[in-house]
Image (spheres, rainbow, N blue to C red):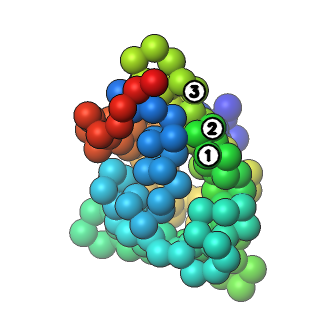
């Protein structure tokens, strides 16, 4: 779905990984490991609540290129072991450069040979101007996040290769 001109406000990619759904869930819900597979989010740490539970908050630290660095507070919105893990970037009231919000979701479905992982995003609150224009120039890949999400799933597949027994 296209929101602001040239921005895809939602999208998804999927891939079958050779691991059971609970093993996949254990990896995607451990946000402290996100830097092992994300092309942009380099690290994250839990800051409030029970790690991995709905309502828990973590801070993700991002980097793109040699100059772009930022962090975001994120809140877990869904946590169903073996089924779904989701979180959203929390709009920061006092920082207009972070007054947007995106929900990131991993849906897991057991299939023959492993688990189908659907990774999706939904921008629920677009950045305001002039930030939208600036982000489009500095972070052009944010106009369509699917290619990076695909890299994330490929890294997840490599991460889980041969690590979990299948039923």
Residue 128 percent coordinates (x, y): 69, 64
- Decide if residue 156 is in sight here: yes
Which residue bears the numbered disc 2? 83
**C-alpha distance separating marks 1 and 2:** 5 Å
Tell me the crowding category of disc 1: few under 14, some 14 to 19, or many 20 or more residues within 10 angstroms, Cα based: some
- Mark toward the viewer: 3 or 1: 1
Mark linked to residue 42: none
Which residue bears the numbered disc 3? 109
**C-alpha distance separating marks 3 and 1:** 11 Å
Q: Is mark 3 on a helix, strand or loop?
A: strand
Residue 166 percent coordinates (x, y): 40, 26
Q: Is mark 1 on a helix, strand or loop?
A: loop
Which residue bears the numbered disc 1? 81
Residue 38 percent coordinates (x, y): 36, 53
**C-alpha distance separating marks 2 and 3:** 7 Å
Tell me the crowding category of disc 2: few under 14, some 14 to 19, or many 20 or more residues within 10 angstroms, Cα based: some
Give above or below for 75 relative to 145.
below
Q: In which quarter of the image is the C terminus?
A: top left
């Amino acid at each position: 779905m296209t929101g602001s001109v040239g921005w895809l406000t939602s999208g998804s990619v999927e891939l079958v990984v050779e691991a059971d759904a609970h093993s996949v869930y254990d990896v995607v819900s451990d946000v402290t490991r996100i830097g092992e597979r994300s092309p942009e989010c380099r690290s994250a740490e839990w800051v409030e609540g029970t790690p991995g539970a709905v309502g828990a908050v973590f801070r993700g630290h991002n980097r793109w290129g040699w100059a772009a660095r930022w962090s975001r507070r994120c809140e877990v919105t869904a946590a169903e072991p073996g089924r779904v893990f989701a979180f959203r970037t929390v709009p920061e009231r006092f920082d207009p450069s972070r007054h947007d919000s995106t929900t990131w979701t991993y849906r897991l479905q057991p299939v023959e040979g492993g688990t189908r992982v659907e990774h999706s995003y939904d921008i629920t609150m677009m950045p305001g101007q002039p930030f939208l224009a600036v982000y489009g120039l500095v972070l052009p890949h944010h106009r369509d996040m699917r290619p990076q999400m695909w890299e994330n799933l490929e890294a997840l597949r490599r991460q889980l290769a041969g690590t979990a027994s299948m039923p």
